[in-house]
C-alpha cells in the first residue's frame, strides 16, 4: 500500500468457514456448451472469439474452394465470397472472421483489401510479382459474406482465404473486458503524408513513434484496451524489422514486421494501448515509410469470460528448426503468461528466419486433423518474414507447425496474448475494506461492558451495517504498533512500556493502547451480532497491523522488539477478541492480519520474528496482505531480487511458512498480479508448494484510476493460471476509509 504509518482494511464479503477461510459454493451460473475442441465452455458472449481446431479454407481462386470464386483476380477488380455456413464456419451468429490471406502467382506487385460492407481506403496484404505472401485480417461479415479487392494497377493474382476462427455477433454492443469490436477499417498513420505522426517523412534508423489511436475520431474510444492493426512497410533503405508494442509495457525487442531493402510488406498484430497510444520502432539501420490501418478494438480489462482476448507484453517461447515437409508441436502452456489449462487460442507471431528455400507454414491444434491446405505464413528464400495470428491449442496447450518448404526452416515463436476457454469462477462472496480512521484518542477508563465508549459506538454502527449488507469477512487493518509522533505539541511514541497502535491515515496522531483497541472492536462484533442487523450470517474478522513505524532500537527508548509486538498482537488483541466473540449468537471468528512490505520500516528478519511470535502465541490464522515492492513483473521471472534487498523467496517465505497463513495480495495494477504469480512459482520450484490465496486487494474506492475489485481478482486469477492449473482466488476486496 502507499507508505502510510498505519493501515486499515475492512469487509471482504463471502461465506468463509471458521477454520479454513474457504469460500462457500458460488451461485449458479450460466449453462455451458462444448467448444470447438470438445471441452466444456461457458455460454456465448457477444464479441468473444471461437477458435476453429484447424483452419477452414473458404476461398481458393485456383480451385473454386467452398463454392466461391474460381479464377485469378485482376487488378482493380473485386469479388464477393460467402463465408458463413462454408467449411467449419457456422451459418449464424458470426460477427467477424479471423482469416489468413495469401496471394500466390501474382503477375505484378500490388495489395489486397479484404473487407465487409463498403470498401475502405486501407490494405491487408502487400504482395510482389512471382512471390507468395500471407497476412492475417479480422473481417466483419455482411450477410455472411466478405469482399476481396485487388488494389494493384496491373496484372492478376490468385487469392486464398483460410478462416482461423470467428467473433460472435453482437460485438458492437459488447462490454466484457477483452471483447472485440469491429469498425470500418481506416488508415491512422501514414508517414508519407504525416497522418497520425505530425510530420511527413520516413522513420529513421532506431527511431520510434507513439501515435495516438484511441479517442481521436478513428472509431476507437478513449477507453479501448487494445487494437487490431495492420502495419505496412514501404521504401525501406535497409533490411530490418518494426517492433510494435504497448508503450506501457517493457520493451521486449520482439519484431512484428520483418522486411528487406525496398520490399513492401504488411503484418497484422494486436497491441495494447497506453493512454490510447501504441509504440512503433524502426529496428534497422535505414529509413522506412510506415502505414498503420486499424480494423477494430478490444474492450479494456482482464478477461472474465471465455473467448475474450488477454494481451500480454510479448516474449519468445520457442525456436524450432523444422525439417523439410516435417511437423513439430510447440508447447505454450505456462509460458510467457499463458495459462496451464483451459486456453482456446494463443496470439503468436511466427518468424520464418532466413529460410534457404521458399515455402510456407501450416498451423493447427495439436491432436486435431491437419487440414489438407492452409497457410499460416508464406516465405521467400533468404528473406525473414513474420505473421501474427491466433492459433488454437490442445488441452495440454500445444499447437502443431508443419514446414512445407523443401529445406529445413528455422521458426521463432513469440507469444503476445491468449484467449481463455473458461469464465472466471464466481466469487465466494462480496466484500469491502476500510481504514477505520474515524477512531479517536481514548485514555479514559474502559466501562464494563464498554457500550458507552465513543469508539465502541462508532464501530458498533459499522458492524451493524456490514452484517446488514451480508458481509462475511471483514479486514480491519488498524495501524503500526510503534510510531513516534507529536500529540498536543508533545513528542510521544509507542514503545515496550507504551504498547498499542497508531490508527491508519491519521498521521500517527491517534494512538490506542491494546485494551482501548479491543474495546472498540468489541463494539464492531456486537454490532455485527445484533439480530436487528444480522439475518443469520457468519463472520471472519481479520484485525491487522503492518511493518511500518519505528523499528530502529537506536531511535526510541524502551524499544518495542518485533517478537514482543507479534506476541502482543496475538495475546492482547486477537485472543481477547476471540474470547469476546465466542459468547455471541452468530459465528464470529477473529484472525490476525499483517501488511508486510519491503518499503516499510522493518527489516526482513524483524518481519519474520514478528510472524513467528504471532503464530506461536495463538491458534488463529494470519492474513498476509502486503505489497511485493519492485519484484519482477515479467511472467516467468523467478528467484530474483525485489526492493531493499528482499527477494521473491523472502516474500514467499513470509506468505507460506505456516499453513494458517492466507495471502490477500495488493493488486492495484495488473503488474502486481504477475509479481505474485512469480513469487508463487519461485516457492513451488523449491519444492514447498503453492501459496494459499484468499483473494485480491484493491483500492479503487480511494484511487478510481486503479483496478476495480472485480478486475483485480481477474488479474490475479489469470496470472496465477500460468503457474497453477486450477487457481483459487475466492474474493475481491477493495479498500476504503470510514470518513
Image (tube, rainbow, N blue to C red):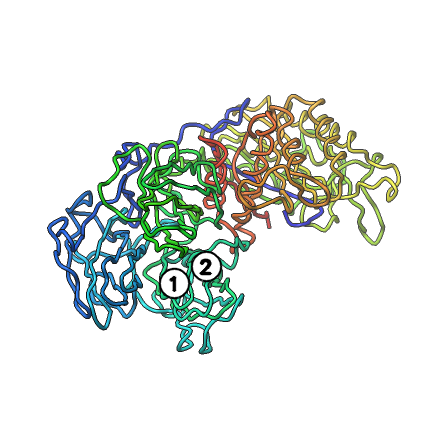
Res. 461 visible in picture: no
| Quadrant hosting residue 18 | top right
* Residue 437 picture location, percent across and down: 65, 47
* Residue 175 picture location, percent across and down: 35, 52
Vertical position of residue 686 compared to residue 406: above or below: above
Question: Nearest the camera: 263 or 255?
Answer: 263
Marks 2/1 in contact by CB < 8 Å: the verdict is yes
Vertical position of residue 733 compared to residue 357: above or below: above
* Residue that appears at 24% across and 69% down: 151
Q: Tag 1's secondary structure? A: strand
* Residue that appears at 46% across and 28% down: 536
Which numbered disc, 2 or 1, marks the residue that appears first in the sequence?
A: 1
Vertical position of residue 628 compared to residue 228: above or below: above
Left or right: residue 668 compared with residue 612 = left
Distance between the alpha carbons at the discs numbered 2 and 1: 9 Å
Vertical position of residue 3 compared to residue 323: above or below: below
Question: Nearest the camera: 130 or 649?
Answer: 130
Q: Tell me the crowding category of disc 1: few under 14, some 14 to 19, or many 20 or more residues within 10 angstroms, Cα based.
A: many
Left or right: residue 442 compared with residue 676 = right
| Quadrant hosting residue 129 | bottom left
**Residue 244 shows which numbered tag?**
2
Q: Tag 2's secondary structure? A: strand
* Residue 480 picture location, percent across and down: 72, 41
Number of numbered tags placed on the structure image: 2
Question: Nearest the camera: 356 or 673?
Answer: 356
Q: Tell me the crowding category of disc 2: few under 14, some 14 to 19, or many 20 or more residues within 10 angstroms, Cα based.
A: many
Left or right: residue 170 compared with residue 382 = left
* Residue that appears at 24% across and 61% down: 114
**Residue 509 shows which numbered tag?**
none
- Residue that carries the numbered disc 1 in the rendered image: 231
Question: Nearest the camera: 255 or 171?
Answer: 255
* Residue 675 picture location, percent across and down: 57, 42
Amino acid at each position: 500500500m502507499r507508505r502510510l504509518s498505519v493501515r486499515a482494511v475492512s469487509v471482504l464479503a463471502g461465506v468463509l468457514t471458521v477454520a479454513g477461510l474457504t469460500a462457500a459454493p458460488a451461485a449458479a451460473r450460466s449453462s455451458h456448451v462444448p467448444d470447438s475442441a470438445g471441452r466444456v465452455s461457458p455460454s456465448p458472449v457477444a464479441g468473444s472469439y471461437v477458435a476453429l481446431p484447424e483452419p477452414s479454407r473458404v476461398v481458393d481462386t485456383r480451385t473454386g474452394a467452398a463454392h466461391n470464386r474460381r479464377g485469378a483476380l485482376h487488378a482493380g477488380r473485386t469479388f464477393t465470397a460467402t463465408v458463413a455456413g462454408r467449411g467449419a464456419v457456422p451459418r449464424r451468429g458470426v460477427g467477424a472472421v479471423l482469416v489468413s490471406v495469401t496471394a500466390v502467382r501474382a503477375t505484378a506487385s500490388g495489395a489486397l483489401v479484404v473487407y465487409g460492407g463498403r470498401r475502405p481506403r486501407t490494405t491487408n496484404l502487400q504482395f510482389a510479382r512471382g512471390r507468395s505472401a500471407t497476412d492475417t485480417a479480422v473481417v466483419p461479415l455482411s450477410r455472411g459474406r466478405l469482399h476481396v479487392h485487388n488494389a494493384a494497377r496491373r496484372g492478376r493474382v490468385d487469392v486464398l482465404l483460410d478462416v482461423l476462427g470467428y467473433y460472435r455477433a453482437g460485438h458492437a454492443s459488447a462490454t466484457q473486458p477483452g471483447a472485440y469490436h469491429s469498425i470500418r477499417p481506416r488508415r491512422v498513420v501514414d508517414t508519407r503524408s504525416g497522418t497520425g505522426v505530425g510530420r511527413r517523412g520516413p522513420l529513421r534508423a532506431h527511431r520510434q513513434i507513439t501515435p495516438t489511436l484511441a479517442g481521436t475520431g478513428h472509431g476507437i474510444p478513449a477507453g479501448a484496451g487494445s487494437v487490431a492493426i495492420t502495419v505496412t512497410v514501404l521504401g525501406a533503405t535497409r533490411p530490418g524489422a518494426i517492433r510494435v508494442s504497448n508503450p506501457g509495457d517493457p520493451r521486449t525487442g520482439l519484431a512484428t514486421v520483418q522486411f528487406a531493402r525496398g520490399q513492401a510488406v504488411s503484418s497484422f498484430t494486436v497491441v495494447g494501448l497506453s493512454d490510447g497510444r501504441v509504440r512503433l520502432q524502426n529496428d534497422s539501420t535505414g529509413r522506412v515509410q510506415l502505414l498503420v490501418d486499424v480494423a477494430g478494438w478490444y474492450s479494456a480489462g482482464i478477461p472474465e469470460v471465455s473467448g475474450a482476448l488477454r494481451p500480454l507484453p510479448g516474449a519468445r517461447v520457442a525456436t524450432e528448426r523444422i525439417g523439410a515437409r516435417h511437423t513439430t508441436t510447440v508447447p505454450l502452456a505456462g509460458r510467457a503468461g499463458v495459462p496451464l489449462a483451459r486456453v482456446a487460442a494463443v496470439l503468436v507471431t511466427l518468424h520464418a528466419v532466413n529460410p534457404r528455400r521458399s515455402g510456407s507454414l501450416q498451423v493447427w491444434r495439436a491432436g486435431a486433423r491437419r487440414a489438407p491446405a492452409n497457410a499460416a505464413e508464406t516465405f521467400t528464400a533468404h528473406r525473414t518474414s513474420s505473421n501474427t495470428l491466433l492459433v488454437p491449442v490442445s488441452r495440454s496447450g500445444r499447437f502443431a507447425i508443419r514446414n512445407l518448404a523443401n529445406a529445413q526452416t528455422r521458426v521463432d515463436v513469440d507469444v503476445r496474448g491468449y484467449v481463455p476457454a473458461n469464465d472466471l469462477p464466481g466469487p465466494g462472496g462480496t466484500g469491502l475494506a476500510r481504514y477505520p480512521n474515524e477512531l479517536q484518542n481514548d485514555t479514559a477508563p474502559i466501562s464494563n461492558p464498554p457500550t458507552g465508549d465513543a469508539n465502541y459506538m462508532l464501530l458498533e454502527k459499522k458492524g451493524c451495517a456490514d452484517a446488514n449488507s451480508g458481509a462475511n469477512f471483514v479486514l480491519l487493518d488498524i495501524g503500526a504498533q510503534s510510531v513516534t509522533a507529536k500529540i498536543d505539541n508533545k513528542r510521544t511514541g509507542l514503545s515496550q512500556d507504551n504498547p498499542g497502535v497508531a490508527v491508519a491515515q491519521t498521521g500517527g496522531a491517534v494512538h490506542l493502547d491494546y485494551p482501548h483497541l479491543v474495546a472498540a472492536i468489541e463494539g464492531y462484533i456486537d454490532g455485527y451480532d445484533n439480530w436487528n442487523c444480522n439475518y443469520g450470517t457468519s463472520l471472519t474478522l481479520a484485525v491487522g497491523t503492518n511493518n511500518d513505524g519505528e523499528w530502529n532500537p537506536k531511535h526510541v527508548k524502551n524499544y518495542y522488539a518485533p517478537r514482543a509486538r507479534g506476541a502482543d498482537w496475538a495475546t492482547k488483541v486477537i485472543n481477547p477478541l476471540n474470547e469476546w466473540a465466542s459468547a455471541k449468537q452468530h459465528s464470529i471468528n477473529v484472525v490476525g492480519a499483517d501488511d508486510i512490505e519491503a518499503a516499510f520500516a522493518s527489516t526482513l528478519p524483524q518481519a519474520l520474528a514478528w510472524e513467528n511470535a504471532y503464530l506461536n502465541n495463538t491458534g488463529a490464522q494470519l492474513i498476509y496482505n502486503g505489497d511485493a515492492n519492485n519484484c519482477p513483473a515479467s511472467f516467468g521471472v523467478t528467484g530474483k531480487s525485489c526492493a531493499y534487498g528482499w527477494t521473491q523467496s523472502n516474500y514467499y517465505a513470509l506468505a507460506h511458512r505456516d499453513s494458517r497463513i492466507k495471502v490477500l495480495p495488493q493488486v492495484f495494477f495488473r503488474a502486481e498480479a504477475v509479481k505474485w504469480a512469480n513469487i508463487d512459482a519461485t516457492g513451488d520450484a523449491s519444492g514447498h508448494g503453492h501459496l494459499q490465496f484468499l483473494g485480491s486487494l484493491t483500492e479503487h474506492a480511494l484511487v478510481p484510476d486503479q483496478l476495480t475489485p472485480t478486475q483485480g481478482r481477474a488479474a490475479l486469477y489469470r496470472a496465477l493460471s500460468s503457474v497453477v492449473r486450477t487457481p483459487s482466488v475466492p474474493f475481491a476486496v477493495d479498500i476504503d476509509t470510514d470518513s
